[in-house]
Image (cartoon, helix red, strand yellow):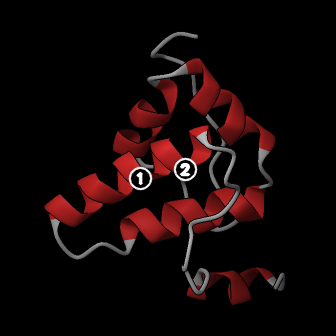
Amino acid sequence: MTGEQQLAGGVVHLLPEDLQQALLAEPAITAAWQDITPLARNEWICWVEDAKQAATRAKRIGRAQEELAAGKRRPCRWPGCAHREKTGKA
């Protein structure tokens, strides 16, 4: 997989560059990302973007890498993207 590859975003959220680069860092993480639904991808993106500080965002990106590699499909203990109501999907 090349660094130029574009991964899919979520239902509402576009995939930010820093998260995309982290997802492309390991083939197993890339495969896990491609295997989850657009709504699940949306949850990960929103969770990362919800961080108020750069340090928190970096920690969440690292945790996303770990959890996706471990087979988790959604962020743990995340109440869900508040923006998804805009899509009509719950």
Which amino acid, by three-letter code, is at mark 2? Glu
Q: Residue at coordinates 54% horizontally, 55% vertically from top-left?
A: 14
Residue 52, image x and y in percent?
Answer: 22, 76
The residue labelled by disc 2 is 67
Q: Which quadrant of the figure has residue 86?
A: bottom right
The residue labelled by disc 1 is 63
Left or right of 54: which side holds 13?
right
- Residue 13 visible to the viewer: no
Q: Residue at coordinates 41% horizontally, 44% vertically from top-left?
A: 19
- Residue 4 visible to the viewer: yes
Which amino acid, by three-letter code, is at mark 1? Arg
Residue 82, image x and y in percent?
Answer: 58, 88
Q: Which quadrant of the figure has residue 70?
A: top right
Residue 34, image x and y in percent?
Answer: 73, 36
Left or right of 9: which side holds 4?
left
Q: Residue at coordinates 63% horizontally, 63% vertically from top-left?
A: 42
Quadrant in which the C terminus is drawn: bottom right
| In contact (CB < 8 Å): disc 2 and disc 1 | yes
In three-dimensional space, the C-alpha distance between marks 2 and 1, rounded to whole angstroms, equals 6 Å
Quadrant in which the N terminus is drawn: top right
